[in-house]
Image: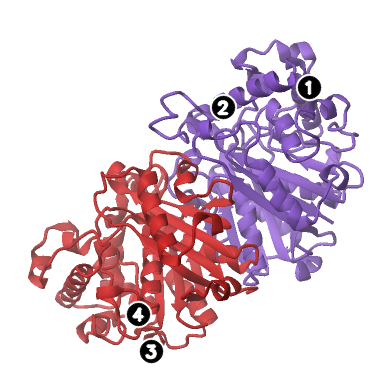
Amino acid sequence: MDKRVAIVDAVQTRHGDALGENIQEIMFGVVKELLDRVGIEKSEIGTMISSSSDYWQGISCSNSYYYDAAGANLKSGSKAADDSALGFHYGVMRVLSGQYKTALVVSVTKCSESPSVHTLTHMSADPFFQRPVGLNETVVAGLQAREYMNRYGLKEEELARVVMKNLGNARKNYHAHRKGELSLEDVLSSPMMVDPLREIDIPATSDGACAVLLAAGEIAGDLTKNPVFVEGLGWNVNHSFVGDQDLLNGALPKAAEMAYRMAGVKDPAKEIDVIEVCDTTSFNEILFTEQLGFCPPGKGRNILNDGTTSMGGAIPVNPSGGLFGANPYVARGLIRISEAALQIKGEAGEHQVRDVKRALAHSVHGLGGQLHSVVILGN
Amino acid sequence: MSQAVAIIGTGQTECGKRTDVSYPELIYEAVGRAFDDSGLSPEDIEAVVSGSMPPAMEGVANPHLYWADAMGAAGKPLIRTATCGSTGMSLAHTGFYHVASGLFDLVLVVGAEKMYEGDPQGTMATVADPFFQRPFLAGAPGIFSLQSNEWAHRYGLDEKRVRMAAAELSVRNHIDALANPYAHIKLNITVDDVLKSRIIAYPVRILDVCPASDGACAVIMASERMVKKLGATPAWIRGVGYCGEEAFFGEGDKVVWQAAINAAKSAYKQAGITNPRKELDVAEVYNPFTFQEMLFYECFGFCDFGHACELVESGTVMRGGDLPCDPSGGTLCNNPIGATGLQRTAEVVLQVTEKAGDHQVPGASTGLAHAMGGLDQFNGIMILSNSL
């Protein structure tokens, strides 16, 4: 997609268990900080796309509540619900249409004010067949993990390594609020939650927000000295019923294929320098990294064990700490994109990976990872 | 824009109390009809856009994931767009940008609602913020009656005159709905019936108010290249406009309503329309309340501010008039909310492609579709035409 849309800059909150500001204040804060950093007025923003979920926000028509706080009073805007990577795609499409030179993409979630992730994702199961069985995103991840371990012999200790790596990476991420230096024993002593996943294998939720400014390629250089170009986008949805899905070969390979085709990426492991994955559980990071094509099926453990996916490895996965560092549910996809962009800009801070030219960001929501998104960014 | 976009197929369900079908089945009904209309099949579609009212209405947290299969979306890109009442129009815009971006050539857009399975007014009451507005702004009629009163008061309009114009609009919509096979409310009423119907929230009476409906609507959008390749009959999207404003009802002027004015202005600008009253042949104005329909005439430039009653009295906006509005019976007679704005769009498509059947406006070539949403906060417009 030859340098037609660029990320000018991106801002996140310092995420937390329970932020003291309300949704409007959090939204205002990230948008104001972003505009100040870029040095433009809100009157210069063409359009605003937001992502939020009415269930997670506890307000129907969740975007009506923060619309003006997001700098969009008397502007054109819309909402791509439930996953902020989709809001990003929509913002890019609005700029590609030629109608807007700039687009603000924003997302906020305050998980501290809503029921647990288990309850809310249980509500995304259909009411007749799947809900009575007790399915939610975590339960289906457990089924997925067990199926994978049976097929490929992945060990619990290897799941633990993902937790240790990501919480370890988060120690250097200013915006993360969960961090830690854990031993194997620490992880394996965590209580079992949905076999084979322990409580610690499942990132707890957070409060947080993210704002990204997009600009048409031809003006991006006027707004920042190091624009990050959107090279590829892909997203794809799987069947509604978990029983109709192949749990180990879902929508992600299709989403990745679309993004790679657009970006002209043939061999992601060679052509992409860093990836930010929605590690919805420790196991899912392994599965998603494979399905993104960074190694053959069943070999995710190898690139984990040999340090390829660690900081300093050939393809660091989640230098930010991923969802283990912070997991504001709907905003997390845009945070992955923002992290990938900052890596390319060389502005990721203490968790900067050296010489990043191209990065990948991933997001997902739904039972069994029903809807996946992939974004390829480059310098 | 990088490529022109047209609507080449529409599908609507019969609306009403649809206990005969589940949510996915209702959606499948609309989607199937859009495929029949366009001659396409699910394999042809490159991306899908779906939406509905706030999902408290559905009782499912991610409705798009629940009915992905009913739309034939599995294995394709899918985005859920939702902006409350304007959802249907926001969906049409999301579909438009999918194609206009150049990323897709054929996109399916689906809006749906089953209002009889949920608690519509309960859901709508929770659109208002929980601290300041929710305690006194209950559901839709409260807000819109405030707006209607503010409008009449601002221009010192005679109460009886406004009442009579609104009653005539109610009759027009109800009689027009008799000719629309998909409409929910089919009542052969007179002005007298409206004037005697019971008060809901002054000045709004029950016959001034839209119903709660079950229903779905689907449209298929195509790029110019695909229109030519398929030899389809296109309704070209000539302009889109959308504008939102403050979250707090009291902060905006809802009479000289900037969100509505701006949305129309930007759509007219793209479409090259300078005199909407003359250049539009038909308009599907979002009219859940009769009084509000008149306010929109003013904001959309059909007449000067304070003069909407004259458009009714002169017959301009009536069947056979110069600018017939809501020949489908409008939202007033059919309101599955998540689909409503998309129905407005589909109805204008039917009009400009001369497929509207018994409610066809003769010779209509350019039309306006509209929807309103948020907390009386968002307005979206689409201008469609049978030529580019």
Type of amino acid under label 1: Arg
Residue A247 in view of the camera: yes
Say which residue label 2 marks: A140
The answer to whether mark 4 and mark 3 are in CB contact below 8 A is no
Residue displayed at 78% across by 41% down: A275
Indicate whether A161 appears above or below A326.
Answer: above
As drawn, the label of residue A179 is none
Occupied quadrant, residue B334: bottom left
As drawn, the label of residue A161 is 1
Labels 4, 3: front one = 4
Q: Which one of the lettered chains is coloured red?
A: B
Residue displayed at 73% across by 16% down: A156
Indicate the colour of chain A. purple
Say which residue label 3 marks: B278
Q: Chain of mark 1?
A: A
Mark 4 neighbour class, 10 Å CA radius: few under 14, some 14 to 19, many 20 or more: many
Residue A137 drawn at (x, y percent): 55, 30
Type of amino acid under label 4: Val
Same chain letter for marks 4 and 2:
no
The residues tagged by marks 3 and 1 sit, at their Cα atoms, a distance apart of 70 Å
